Amino acid sequence: MVHALERARRHLAPGGFLVCIQPHRTRRPFIAVRSPGRRQPICELINPVFQPLIDSANGAIASIVESGLVSLIRAEHHQFRVRIASPSQLRLYLTDGIRPPRFPAGGRKRLLEVWGARPSGAWIEVTEHMTVVGMQATR
C-alpha cells in the first residue's frame, strides 16, 4: 500500500488532498435486530484474516506521513448502518466482500433465535465502522 500511496501523491499538486477510507482498526461490523423503538444486539462479527491488512494499511499511512510526502490533516472514525430484510439477505451482504467476516461461536444461533421471535416489522441492522484519513501533499 505504501507504493500505491506514493504513486497517488505523485499525481497531486503541492497542497493537493488525499483521502483514504478504510475499516476501523479495532471495531468490526455489529449485528442487531431492530424494530420500531427497540434494538436487540446480537454480536460483533470477526475476521482474523483482515486485522493484519488493516494494521499494514495504517503502517503505510504512517510511513508516507513520516517521510514527509504528505502531512496528516485529520483521521476521523465514522459508522453507517445498513438495513437488511432477512437472514438470507444478510448472508448475501456479508459474502459480497473479498474477505467476508463471520459470526463468532453462537452468534448465528442467537440471530436466528431472536429473528424467530421478532415483532412485526423488524429488520436486521449491520453497523459498519470506518476511518477516514485526510492528508495534504507537501513539497
Image (spheres, helix red, strand yellow):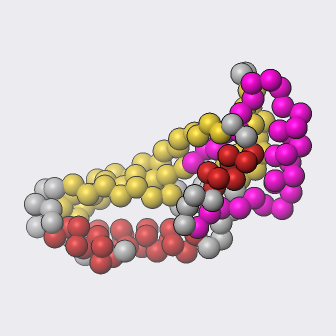
At a point 10% along the width and 60% down the height, the residue shown is: 13
Q: Position of residue 89 (x, y in %)?
A: 68, 46
Q: Position of residue 34 (x, y in %)?
A: 72, 32
At a point 87% along the width and 52% down the height, the residue shown is: 109
Decide which of 125, 9 is in the foreground and name it: 125
Whether residue 50 sits left or right of residue 78 in the image: it is right
Decide which of 83, 59 is in the foreground and name it: 83
Q: Quadrant of the C terminus?
A: bottom left
Q: Quadrant of the N terminus?
A: bottom left
Q: Is residue 40 above or below residue 44?
A: above
Q: Is residue 64 visible?
A: no
Decide which of 67, 83 is in the foreground and name it: 83
Q: Position of residue 82 (x, y in %)?
A: 58, 40
Question: For residue 64, what is the image quadrant?
Answer: bottom left
Which range of residues does the magenta coloring cover? Answer: 99-128
Question: For residue 63, what is the image quadrant?
Answer: bottom left
Q: Is residue 121 above or below residue 96?
A: above
Whether residue 75 sits left or right of residue 88 in the image: it is left
Whether residue 95 sits left or right of residue 78 in the image: it is right
At a point 62% along the width and 63% down the height, the residue shown is: 100
Decide which of 107, 77 is in the foreground and name it: 107
Q: Position of residue 38 (x, y in %)?
A: 75, 26
At a point 50% along the width and 58% down the height, the residue shown is: 23
